[in-house]
């Protein structure tokens, strides 16, 4: 710990067992626990709590009153040595909470690179987030959730524990998800949440070609709009479309689902 470094504000409390890179900035009234690691270029603005066994990578910006590394909200947790691993270039805004893992999985809560966690969002124990994800204001992930790259989790939305949000998926504001959300899919609503179709806007913004989007639309037409069960839909897709990364990703996602996946309602399909 570089305790005399002017980049650590004199009002900050840094445990002697923490490791602070000389290029990091620790602002006023921050609290850094034992075995915490803060990487180069990362800025903790003020009043940030980083609990023990938390690693924060490079060039992250953490706003006031964020709490990272708190114990998991799990009644069975007995102070086992679980961890949080946060990558690089993330933006973590005011009052976000991120909890350490339990012993029920891999002992690690993981957040990748280039994510934007807006104010009051919550990442529970054992969650795994990829990269380029946006969690809007007040979005909440239950324990053991997985969020794929470039997904968007809408404001004031909730995701049930053990659910997965596929890559490039979109959850509308206020949605409540209790099943997996397919890659590339757009969902919205509460009890039941409904699949609205392909996340066309998100795919265009991420450089998907018109041809690729058209192929995905055709796949989703079968998955969500035709009156087929999951096995029948997968067989139809694999028979009707040549092998592609997108087709294989969707099929593998469905086959590994443990909670099922969000489907359409009779009037929900959006063909745009």
Image: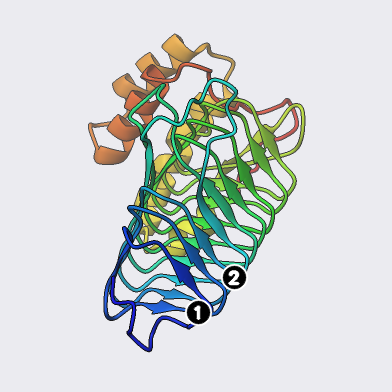
Q: Position of residue 165 (x, y in %)?
A: 49, 38
The answer to whether residue 127 is left or right of residue 41 is right
The answer to whether residue 259 is left or right of residue 4 is right
Residue 109 in view (yes/no): yes
Q: Is residue 47 above or below residue 127?
A: below
Q: Which mark is residue 95?
A: none
Answer with mark 1 or mark 2, whichever residue precedes in sequence. Answer: 1
Q: Is residue 75 above or below residue 32?
A: above
Which residue position is annotated with label 1? Answer: 27
Q: Position of residue 227 (x, y in %)?
A: 59, 15
In terms of secondary structure, where does tag 1 sit?
A: loop
Q: Position of residue 78 (x, y in %)?
A: 48, 25
The colour scheme of the drawn protein is rainbow
Judge by depth and name the residue closer to the eye, 271 or 70: 70
Q: Position of residue 29 (x, y in %)?
A: 57, 74
Q: Residues within 10 Å of mark 2 (few under 14, many from 20)?
A: many
Quarter of the image for residue 37 reads bottom left
Q: Residues within 10 Å of mark 1 (few under 14, many from 20)?
A: many
Q: Is residue 129 above or below residue 226?
A: below
Quarter of the image for residue 236 reads top left
At 65% from the left and 52% from the top, the residue drawn is: 154
At 55% from the left and 79% from the top, the residue drawn is: 28
At 54% from the left and 24% from the top, the residue drawn is: 261
At 63% from the left and 44% from the top, the residue drawn is: 140
Q: Are marks 1 and 2 in contact (CB under 8 Å)?
A: yes
Q: Marks 1 and 2, how far apart in space? A: 7 Å
The answer to whether residue 96 is left or right of residue 7 is right
Q: Is residue 33 above or below residue 185?
A: below
Q: Which mark is residue 47?
A: 2
Judge by depth and name the residue closer to the eye, 139 or 209: 139
In terms of secondary structure, where does tag 2 sit?
A: loop
């Amino acid at each position: 710990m570089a305790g005399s470094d002017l980049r650590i504000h004199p009002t900050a409390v840094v445990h002697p067992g923490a490791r602070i890179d000389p290029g990091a900035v620790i602002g006023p009234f921050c609290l850094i626990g034992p075995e915490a690691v803060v990487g180069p270029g990362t800025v903790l603005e003020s009043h940030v709590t980083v609990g023990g066994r938390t690693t924060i990578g490079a060039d992250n910006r953490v706003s006031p009153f964020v709490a990272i590394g708190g114990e998991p909200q799990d009644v069975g947790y007995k102070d086992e040595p679980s961890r949080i691993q946060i990558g690089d270039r993330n933006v973590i805004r005011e009052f976000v909470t991120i909890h350490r893992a339990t012993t029920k999985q891999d002992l690690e809560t993981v957040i990748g690179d280039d994510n934007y966690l807006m104010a009051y969002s919550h990442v529970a124990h054992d969650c795994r987030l990829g990269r380029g994800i946006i969690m809007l204001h007040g979005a909440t992930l239950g324990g053991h959730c997985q969020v794929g790259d470039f997904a968007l989790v809408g404001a004031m939305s909730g995701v049930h524990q053990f659910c997965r949000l596929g890559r490039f998926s979109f959850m509308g504001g206020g949605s409540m998800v209790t099943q997996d959300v397919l890659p590339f899919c757009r969902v919205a609503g509460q009890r039941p949440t409904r699949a609205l179709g392909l996340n066309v806007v998100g795919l265009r913004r991420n450089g998907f070609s018109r041809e690729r989007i058209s192929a995905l639309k055709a796949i989703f037409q079968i998955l969500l709009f035709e009156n087929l069960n999951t096995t029948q839909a997968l067989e139809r897709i694999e028979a009707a479309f040549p092998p592609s990364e997108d087709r294989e990703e969707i099929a593998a996602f469905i086959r590994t689902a443990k909670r099922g996946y969000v489907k359409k309602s009779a009037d929900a399909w959006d063909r745009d």
